[in-house]
Image (cartoon, grey):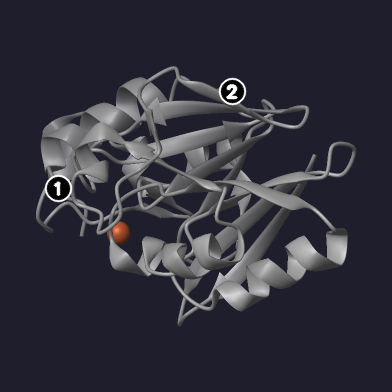
Amino acid sequence: MVLEQIRVGSDNFCYVIYCPVHKKAAIVDPGFDATKALQVLTSQNVQLEYVILTHYHSDHSSETKHLKKNYPLAQIVASKEDGKRLPIRPDVVVSDGSKLKVGTIVLSFLLTPGHTSGGICIIVDGNALLTGDTLFIGDCGRTDLPGGSLEEMFQTLQEKILSLPEDLIVYPGHDYGAKPFDSLGNQKRTNKTLRARTLKEFSLIP
Ligand SMILES: [Fe+2]
């Protein structure tokens, strides 16, 4: 499995995940400048199978059309809730526990509401955790936008994220932290939003 983290827009991350054996790829969150991700596909001679949107916000999804133009057979993947808010209908709707394969790579999906009502995180081959705008390095996503919920975000962090293995590497949707990625174990120890133990404590984080 190869995962490439590509910085796009002012501070967004887009990801290309590909299987060099079967020459299949998935792109996660093409918000800006899809040409950078397309260059990876062409240079590696891999076929785009899935365009996965962690949530509906345009800074994570607006280049989907551009990718579909180049790879018309690529399938758009989103949750049911956020899929409804996208300008293009998803081809594949994922929910908690859904799995997809890209060549030999296994993608496992978690429904992680809080930033939006249908936000998802993706575990790639049991070693990378793509968190979209659910979890950043050192912080979590905003909960004050339409569809966001402070209570749901707290529940997601407590019940979904904190229960995952420490050796997963967190790859966020924005470059907001001191580093572009980090181990989940380190985030569990240092990220203020994962250290809050009660909803009250969580709500008081600046
Ligand atoms: Fe967002």
Residue 139: numbered disc:
none
The furthest residue to the right: 21
Q: Nearer the viewer, residue 21 or 10?
A: 21
Q: Earlier in the sequence, mark 2 or mark 1?
A: 1
Where is residue 178? Give x, y as percent. Answer: 55, 66
The structure residue drawn at horizontal position 39% and vertical position 62%, both measured from the top left corner, is 60
- SS of the residue under disc 2: loop
Amino acid type at image mark 1: Gly
Residue 148: numbered disc:
1
The structure residue drawn at horizontal position 70% and vertical position 47%, both measured from the top left corner, is 25
Query: Does the residue tagged 2 have its C-beta within 8 Å of any atom of ligand 1?
Result: no
Where is residue 66? Give x, y as percent. Answer: 49, 70
Residue 165: numbered disc:
2
The structure residue drawn at horizontal position 25% and vertical position 38%, both measured from the top left corner, is 118
Q: Residues within 10 Å of mark 1 (few under 14, many from 20)?
A: some
The C terminus, quarter of image:
bottom left
Q: Residues within 10 Å of mark 2 (few under 14, many from 20)?
A: few
Image side of residue 102 versus residue 27, left or right:
right
Image side of residue 59 versus residue 168, left or right:
left
